[in-house]
Image (tube, rainbow, N blue to C red):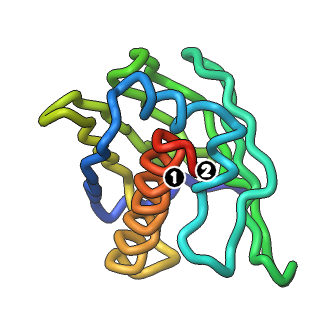
Amino acid sequence: MTSEPITISTITISTWIDAPVDHVWQCWTQPDHITQWNFASPDWCCPSADADIRVGGPYRARMEARDGSFGFDFAGTFEEVEPQQALTLVIADGRKARTTFTPMKGGTQVSTTFDTETQNPVELQRQGWQSILDNFKRHSEAFKAGSA
């Protein structure tokens, strides 16, 4: 029997990236880039990703411990796609994650608001998602500089 997830709350995380919005959008949406940043700590990796960036398009990112001890597919369907502005992903369990891309101060502000889940403490979820976003910032800026 499948039940709907219980949403405790929403969390918003954000970062400022020293790169124009078109570059940031490319790094966020292209699978070759997603595999370079989509993990919360150095002992994890994202060996594969697929993203069909259109309303109704599927998203999947394989997340694994580098030692092979654990892994899972983070998957969903795009509900909103506004190129270089916003994406909303409906995660496979029904929760939503909306990411916005705002040009500002010579760079781009990236913010994600996501529904929490009930298996992990809210603060742990915030830290994990923020760590992934911090990896994204590092990748986007390094790729812009030509060193990634």
- The image position of residue 124, as x and y in percent, is 40, 79
Identify the residue at image location x=43%, y=16%: 83
Mark on residue 129? none
Q: Is residue 73 left or right of residue 148?
A: right
Residue sitting at the far left: 105
Disc 1, SS: helix
The residue to which callout 1 is attached is 139
Disc 2, SS: loop
- Disc 1 + disc 2, Cβ < 8 Å: yes
Q: Nearer the viewer, residue 115 or 146?
A: 146
Q: Quadrant of residue 53?
A: top right
- The image position of residue 74, as x and y in percent, is 66, 53
Check disc 1: other Cα within 10 Å, few if <14, some if 14-19, many if 20+.
many
Identify the residue at image location x=42%, y=48%: 141
| Earlier sequence position, callout 1 versus callout 2 | 1
Q: Which of the image's four quarters has the N terminus?
A: bottom right
Mark on residue 148? 2
Q: Is residue 38 above or below residue 100?
A: below
Identify the residue at image location x=42%, y=71%: 125
Q: Nearer the viewer, residue 56 or 38?
A: 38
Q: Is residue 78 left or right of residue 82?
A: right
Q: Quadrant of residue 66?
A: bottom right
